[in-house]
Image: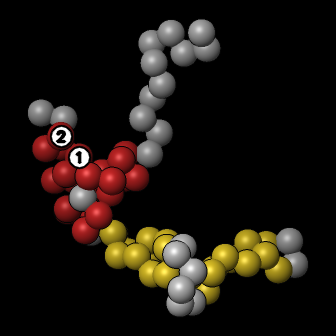
Amino acid sequence: KRHPKGKMLHDPLAACVMMNPEICTFEEVEVYRSKGEWGSRRAANTRTKISVSVKPELFKHTFFLQNQ
C-alpha cells in the first residue's frame, strides 16, 4: 500500500555483490560498542565479515550488464 509502484533499489552495490562477491574484499571481524560508538576489529572465527575495499570497475560492469 505504501509503495504502489514498488520499492526503489536503495543499495545497488550490495545487490551487485550478491551476484558477484569479487566486487568487494572482505575481512572477518568482531563488532563492538565502546563509549556509545560502534566499531569493528579483525578477529578470527566470528563468521562476521565486512567489506574493506571495492573494485569500482567490476561493480559498474556487473551493475550495467544486469540492466541491459
Q: Is residue 38 left or right of residue 55?
A: right
**Residue 28 image offset from top left, x and y in percent:** 49, 81
Specify the quadrant of the image occupied by residue 31: bottom right
Residue 50, horizontal then vertical, whole percent? 49, 72
Up-down: is 32 above or below 15? below
Q: Residue furthest right?
A: 35
In the displayed structure, does residue 49 sit left or right of residue 36?
A: left
Q: Which residue is mark 2?
A: 66
Q: Position of residue 17 (x, y in %)?
A: 32, 57
Q: Are marks 2 and 1 in contact (CB under 8 Å)?
A: yes
| Nearer the observer, 14 or 47 | 47
Which quadrant of the figure contains the N terminus?
A: top right
Amino acid at circle 2: Gln
**Amino acid at pointer 1:** Phe
Q: Residues within 10 Å of mark 2 (few under 14, many from 20)?
A: few
Disc 2 is placed on an element classified as helix
Residue 29 appears left or right of 63: right
- Which label number is shown at residue 6? none
Q: Which residue is mark 1?
A: 63
**Residue beneath the point at 50% across and 9% down:** 4
| Residue 12 appearing in the image | yes
| Colour mode of the rendering | secondary structure
Q: Quadrant of residue 52?
A: bottom left
> Against 19, is 43 above or below?
below
